[in-house]
Amino acid sequence: MTSGDVTTQGTGASPGGQAPQWSPAHNPTRRPMLRTALAIGVAASLFLLCLLILLGILGERLTTQTIVTSALMAIIPVLIIVPTFLWLDRYEAEPARYIVFAFLWGALVAVVGAFFLNTFGLKMLVEARWTDPLETGAVYLAPITEETLKGLGILLIYLFRRREFDGIIDGIVYAGLIGAGFAFSENILYLGQAYNEYGGEGLTSTFLVRGLMGPFGHPLFTSLTGIGIGIAVSARRPAVRVLSILAGWICAMLLHGLWNLSALAGMDGFFAAYVSYQVPLFLAFIGFLLWLRRREGRLIGRYLSPYADAGWLTHAEVTMLSHLRLRRAARAWARQNGGRPAKRSMDAFQDSASDLALLRSRLVHGTAEEGASEREMVLLEAITSHRRDFVGSPVT
């Protein structure tokens, strides 16, 4: 099936008359299952190893009581950041396993890797008798190592789970979760060290700056890398994909460096920078997120309309699927009329339709992954099946 065709309902044939190369037969090979098990095993082993190393790093510097207290305070910003990025992903929610992977990558792998690289880099600067090695490390070294390691987590999802990466919103969501995980682990160390050195007053002031004034710091920095990778998803030319990823990564490092530089300028300098450009930048970022979410709704309506013309959906369903308010009303209607099973079917119907629309966008633009046409048919059949569960019969 070409990117310009939409199959007609029930026939499985495209307008050109050619049957799609798709079969519902079960794949008899066990290799996909083995690959999945192997990937989960490798990721779990890596996370466990990094967790043990992180606990060792914290244990050398902090008491158990301080670690627990710092962790309880560090989790407060997480309860703000994570729901914010999940709210952004309402139209086409990412699989839970990738959300967990992103958070753990930031909280364990990126933090541990950055600790050793930053420590090694700082040691080299000291041995070289570099002028102001601490300032150089904070402004130049830390942004490079930390944004590279955090961005690597997004890049891994993009390279190995391409089907679950639809564009800029997905890049921002994965980046935000990685940044939230990184900030959580880093805050435990900073809060604990502040308490050891300055007591309760130091703990409170550090929490005020890192937990309340700048909770979106790391997620915002890394989101620039996520935007670059999200642009690469829809780019046809390899050079554009590479340049967009590099541009996002460089911007993330620059913004991170500016933040660290303002933190070294003393409280007066930090507050001046905070008011002059950090708060406006954060507000602009929030506005950008709102625009992206509305834009995704419009895209869903645009790319589902051809399926309504072909009979797979009704135009009323397309309107519902492209507005979050109408989606909520549809879920409430399904639960009222069919209970929890109908509500679950409506959820699955909406998720599959959103996935289909974003897949259709990639097909039209010629940037879809291998096997996208077959997945299109799978999603169409899933939509029909889910509708049958909460309506009772397919659309006619």
Image (cartoon, helix red, strand yellow):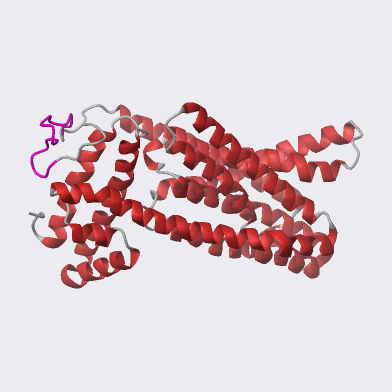
Q: Which residue is drawn at 29% across and 47% down?
A: 357
Query: Foreground residue, 158 or 167?
Result: 167
Q: Quadrant of residue 127?
A: top right
Q: Position of residue 341 (x, y in %)?
A: 20, 62
Query: From which residue to which does the magenta span run?
Result: 8-23
Q: Which residue is drawn at 27% across and 56% down?
A: 350
Q: Quadrant of residue 316?
A: bottom left
Q: Where is residue 137 in the image (x, y as percent from the top left)?
A: 79, 42
Quadrant of the snapshot with the C terminus: bottom left
371 to the left or right of 269: left
Reply above or below: 101 against 17: below
Q: Where is residue 57 in the image (x, y as percent from the top left)?
A: 71, 46
The majority secondary structure of the magenta stretch comes to loop
Residue 53 visible to an observer of this rendering: no
Quadrant of the snapshot with the N terminus: top left
Query: Foreground residue, 98 or 221?
Result: 221
Q: Where is residue 349 in the image (x, y as percent from the top left)?
A: 23, 55
Q: Which residue is drawn at 57% across and 60% down?
A: 78
